[in-house]
Image: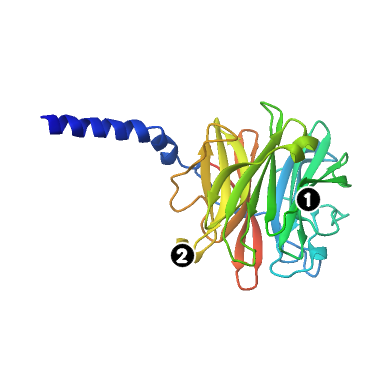
Amino acid sequence: MLSMIKKIMVLLLVLLFFGTEIPAQAQKYPKLNESYPAFQGDKGKWDENKVHTLSIVEVNKEGFKYWGYYGLAYYGDSDPSVRKGGLVRSNDLVHWTKYEGNPIIPGDCRWPSVAYVDGVFYMFYAEYLKNTDSRIVMLTSKDGKKFENKSVVIPLVPGWQNQNPFVYYHKKDKTFNLVYYNGQERSPEGFNNYNINLVRSTDPYKLKDVEPKTLAHSNICLAAPSLAYYNNKFYLLAESFRYGKWDDKWVTVGLVSDQIDDGYKMLNNEPPVLYDNDACAFQYVFNNKLYITYSHCLNLSKWEWELRMVKAVK
């Protein structure tokens, strides 16, 4: 009898300890519709076969509801001068028109991400030192085409990569939330250290003074984060790659939390949210609908990618 009571007590303690973990882990990312290509680079031009990321803001100016800022995919020792940023615009998130003045950022611009708040465009992107160490900068614009006033938000630290910025403006508390990848996979020692960090402030100019908070950590590839608030949950997406898993393909995994800056748990999606050499996901909510722009790899050996979009099923 005593032995049975002990077993019951142990079981109750286990349930008490793990009970708060189970609901979050059991959640899944919203079901997605079939994806579709967004737009491609022009043959023989600066963006041929290299369109990689797309950041979208709702603007309603110059005849276009949505303005998108795109960056390119380059690998290895590519010259930073070829990393340019472009502008596309749309009214339906399906058909996109390229701005005739592209590229709007002339070089060393990887992973542009933009927030549009009170008539000002805030752009964040990564700059590199010899294709290894990197930092994150912010520029501003009144017209969405000419960006200036560059300032450093996340500084360069020798041996570290601070890159893959994604800015999310949370309207409920009027905060700018910058998530980014912080790690050491390019260090000479080959030490893998992957962190998803967050800085947040009501003033974008004070983000540089905020102590970063780590939302997720891994010893295998976990990078390229994005944030969205949907159905009263904060969803965090990140790309991942692990030899011997997911058919040796790039995937996008998801985490979820009730708080924007803490408590993220891995979603119970298997296969992952995106799983066919799909990475670099940016999440957005427009008209209460959840969208993802992401990069699908057509040829890993040639490092050729296709920009795609997908919408969640309501």
Point out residue 280 in the picture as x, y percentages from the top left corner: 63, 54
Q: Position of residue 267 (x, y in %)?
A: 47, 44
Three-letter residue code for mark 2? Asp
Q: Which residue is mark 1?
A: 88
Up/down of 313 relative to 88, above or below: above
Tell me residue 217's x, y (percent): 54, 49
Query: Which amino acid, by three-letter code, is at mark 1?
Result: Val
**66 relative to 259 in the view: left or right:** right
Residue 118 occupies quadrant: top right
Residue drawn at 75 percent across, 38 percent down: 209
In percent of the image, x 59 and y 66: which residue is there? 190
In contact (CB < 8 Å): disc 2 and disc 1: no
The image's mark for residue 11 is none
Mark 2 Cα-neighbour bin, 10 Å: few <14, some 14–19, many ≥20 = few
SS of the residue under disc 2: helix
Instruction: Single out the residue that lies furthest toward the left.
Output: 1
List the residue tagged with mark 2.
247
At x 57% / y 34%, what residue is drawn?
230
| x and y, in percent, of residue 251 in the image | 53, 57
Calculate the distance from the C-alpha at mark 2 to the C-alpha at mark 1.
34 Å
176 is higher (above) or lower (below) than 107: above
Front position in the image: 4 or 104: 4
- In the picture, residue 9 is in which quadrant? top left
Position of the N terminus by quadrant: top left
Q: Is residue 175 visible?
A: yes
